[in-house]
Amino acid sequence: MHLVTLNADAITARLPQLSALLHACVQDGASIGFILPFGLDDSHAFWADNVRPAVACGSRLLLVLDLDGALAGAVQLDWDTPANQAHRAEVRKLLVHPAFRRRGIARQLMQAVEERARALPRQLLTLDTRTHDHAEPLYLSLGYNIAGVIPDYALAPEGGRLDSTTVMYKQLSVS
């Protein structure tokens, strides 16, 4: 496993891999802000028009994990916060390709993003996840606390129903 921080140029160079990763996760039912139908062009636009500019301006971090020469996972840390919230950051879009699940990739990405947050220094991380999704136990095992559940928060990826989201946080010790 090889963990890499991507800058804007590296995002451009790896757009096909990043697009394939996001596309595979959405097609597999991940509730990460997109609904079906969701094509590779949609995925490409997300990385090129949303993530790359935020990374280029220095308000977001993109970590990826390569395994056996393939992009196995990614996570983002967004610290574009108001002045009164300069102590916190948000974990966004934890993605693990369906072909690489159950290998500890999500845990490794989360531990790495927490390490980067401490170095900023940020002492509070927040995130949200679909309630009762397979990621929720992972976050709890990493020490995240549930702040609350918001019912009917987002349309399910396949449409047809509204899912609740669980808002979580973790306080970090900053050295």
Image (spheres, helix red, strand yellow):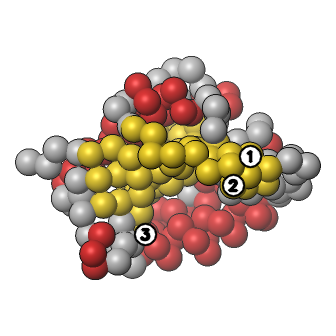
Relative height, residue 42 to residue 132 (above, below): below
Mark toward the start of the polypeptide (1 vs 2): 2
> Can you identify the residue that label 1 sits on?
163
- Foreground: disc 2 or disc 3: 2
Say if mark 1 contacts mark 2, CB within 8 Å: yes
Q: Amino acid at mark 1?
A: Asp
> Can you identify the residue that label 3 sits on?
55
- Is 63 positioned to the left or the right of 133 in the image? left
Residue at position x 45%, y 34% from top?
139
Mark toward the start of the polypeptide (3 vs 1): 3
- Foreground: disc 3 or disc 1: 1
**Of 34 and 23, the residue lying toward us:** 34
**Of 4 and 63, the residue lying toward us:** 63
**Of 70 and 18, the residue lying toward us:** 18
**Residue 46: which quarter of the image?**
bottom right
Please tell me how crowded label 1 is: few (under 14), some (14-19), or many (20+) other residues with Cα within 10 Å. Answer: some
- Is 82 positioned to the left or the right of 175 in the image? right
Callout 3: helix, strand or loop?
helix
Callout 1: helix, strand or loop?
strand
Q: Amino acid at mark 2?
A: Tyr
Query: Which quarter shows the N terminus?
Result: top left
Residue at position x 39%, y 78% from top?
57
- Is 128 positioned to the left or the right of 144 in the image? right
> Can you identify the residue that label 2 sits on?
153
Q: Amino acid at mark 3?
A: Val
**Of 115 and 89, the residue lying toward us:** 89
